[in-house]
């Protein structure tokens, strides 16, 4: 069976961000935007949030080992055509993502420097 990247014809875009349960920001908003633009969206969850349209109640950053495991799983099968970052949460997550992307196939990168959820 071919990998996902050889089966799909639309561009593949990977988003790194937090999960927003209301869908107005983060991974959920990125995936909706990607779909509306005709691209295939993938995600690496860097934080979980408890939030709504009124505010953020709690943030839990993803452990570095899980960020790495998500990236390895994605890149073992699919090479994105573009990458977008959002809320990375900690300096350690920023370093992990930066190091990983620096060691893998180059793709255009959009950096959205989300500082606070």
Image: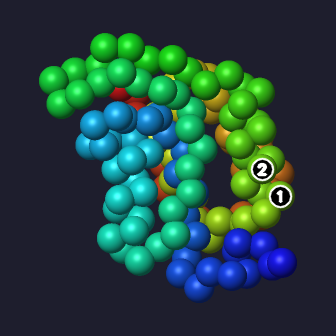
Residue 18 horizontal/vertical position (percent): 46, 34
List the single residue furthest toward the left: 54
Under circle 2, the secondary element is helix
Kindly identify which residue carries mark 2: 73
Give me the residue at 41% from left, 24% from top.
Answer: 49
Would you say residue 92 is visible in this rendering? no
Q: Nearer the viewer, residue 82 or 76?
A: 76
Q: Nearer the viewer, residue 31 or 1?
A: 1
Would you say residue 38 is visible in this rendering? yes
Residue 76 horizontal/vertical position (percent): 83, 58
Mark 1: few/some/many CA within 10 Å (<14, 14-19, 20+):
few
Give me the residue at 83% from left, 78% from top.
Answer: 1
Q: Nearer the viewer, residue 52 or 108?
A: 52
Give me the residue at 71% from left, 42% from top.
Answer: 70
Classify 92 as above or below 86: above
Quadrant occupied by the C terminus: top left
Mark 2: few/some/many CA within 10 Å (<14, 14-19, 20+):
few
Classify 108 as above or below 65: below
Residue 109 horizontal/vertical position (percent): 56, 58
């Amino acid at each position: 069976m071919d990998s996902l990247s050889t089966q799909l014809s639309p561009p593949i875009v990977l988003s790194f961000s937090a999960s927003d349960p209301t869908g107005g920001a983060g991974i959920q908003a990125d995936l909706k935007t990607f779909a509306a633009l005709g691209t295939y969206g993938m995600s690496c969850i860097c934080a979980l949030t408890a939030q709504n349209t009124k505010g953020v109640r709690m943030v839990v950053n993803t452990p570095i080992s899980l960020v790495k495991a998500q990236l390895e799983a994605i890149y073992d099968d699919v090479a994105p055509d573009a990458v977008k970052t959002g809320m990375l949460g900690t300096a350690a997550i920023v370093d992990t993502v930066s190091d990983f992307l620096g060691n893998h196939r180059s793709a255009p990168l959009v950096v959205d420097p989300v500082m606070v959820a």
